[in-house]
Amino acid sequence: MSSFAITGVGELTTEDVEGRVLRDAAVVVEGERVVWIGPSARAPAADRSFDAAGRALLPGWVDSHSHIVFDGDRADEFEARMAGRPYQAGGIAATVAATRAASDKRLEALAAKRAREAALQGTTWLETKTGYGLSVEHEARCARVAARVADDVTFLGAHLPPPGVDVDEYVRLVTGPMLAAVAPFAGWADVFCERGAFTPEQSREVLTAARAAGLGLRVHGNQLGPGQGIALAVELGAASVDHCNHVGPADLDALAGSWTGGGRGTVATLLPACDLSTRAPLAPARALIDAGVVVAIASNCNPGTSNTSSMPFCVATAVLQMGLSVAEAVRAATWGGAAALGRESGDGAIGSITLGGRADLQLLDAPSAAHLAYRPGMALTRAVWKAGRRLDGGGTGSPPRHRRAESVRPEV
Ligand code: NIG
């Protein structure tokens, strides 16, 4: 098995159990795994060596919430929103129409291009959802595509009831034939528990059926207003409840309580780019962390509310606008995302740099992770490795360079 060393790391953020940050460090990778971490001067020999020249090395981003399987453009809706119109979930229907009309080849090419764009900004683990198909045939097709381009797939047939259908009848479709058709491709199920989408009772039906089919649970909750999404997610032991813009005291207690007593709780996944793009009240990241809730940050890349897969942008926003420290934001975008996917520990754990762990790494073109927020919007991703394999086009020992994602005709 071939090995390589990354030496001369100015700042190594491990996100290991002790949260160690090492200076002048080195990491040695053999195959897919990290086999040595320590002072650069003592790094053992490896087949190849890469001099980080004082740059910062971090775990790759774990983007635990995205919707990259779609066709169509909603820039007009975005512009109207920026001119004062509020976000409405109904825009999803426009994307459903465009997605259904796309050929299999085109849909996969678009999704693969988005996954590649994410990787070039340091994302080494990507979750993505169905939810723009909303029929048995189209949800299954979206799930097949998602399984080809992403690492974790979530069934979101309960994204929005298609216009004109009886919602209870649609819930029966989602929990019956649609779930059966999608389950072979998915590890998770999700529901948009929100006024205008699915009621708490309908959401419970969807989640209960999905759990019985062996899928893990996630919830879109408390995005557009106060509601039962967070409470339901905690009650059903969902791995994550996502958005959390409207968090009342009882929601905060429920989320924090889910992490007491040594058990695995429900992660609050915050979506800073979505909050900006919908001009929503920012999720109360500071209050959640202060209350002891495990928080993740994700991109929510989708054509309606957050058309970006840039985790560096999300991290910078969490720091500059949501009141997190750089260390908290980086942790939420790496280890926190892994926790939201139940993958933060055990063999094959992601979201941290640990001995024996997967070599999912990103090198910044900066001496410290602080530059992610200190120099927001700058292209700071210098090199990316996923399971020990270089993703950004550079060889292990060659000078890093940026490569553009393959081009696919735009969705207009
Ligand atoms: O996570 N909230 C629901 N789903 C997406 C929005 C999808 C859309 O508007 O197309 C979200 O923000």
Image: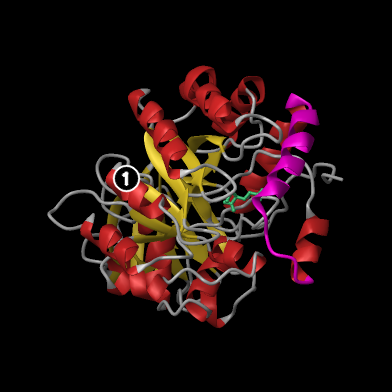
Question: Relative to residue 1, is residue 34 depicted above or below?
Answer: below
Locate residue 46, reporting x and y percent: 37, 50
Q: Relative to residue 82, is residue 158 drawn left or right?
A: left
Q: Nearer the viewer, residue 40 or 33?
A: 33
At 77% from the left and 42% from the top, the residue drawn is: 94
Q: Which residue is mark 1?
A: 349
Viewer can see residue 129: yes
Q: Is residue 153 above or below residue 269?
A: above
| 129 is higher (above) or lower (below) than 262 | above
- Residue furthest to the right in view is 412
Look at the numbered disc 1 and give the secondary structure of its residue. loop
Residue at the image position 54 percent from the left and 82 percent from the top: 374
Quarter where residue 146 is shown: top right
Q: Residue 198: x percent and y percent?
A: 52, 42
Residue type, numbered disc 1: Ala
Furthest toward the left, the residue is: 261
Q: Is residue 1 visible?
A: no
Nearest to the observer: residue 7 or residue 409: 409
Q: Which residues are magenta?
A: 83-104
What main secondary structure does the magenta stretch of the protein show?
helix
Q: Is residue 386 left or right of residue 140?
A: left
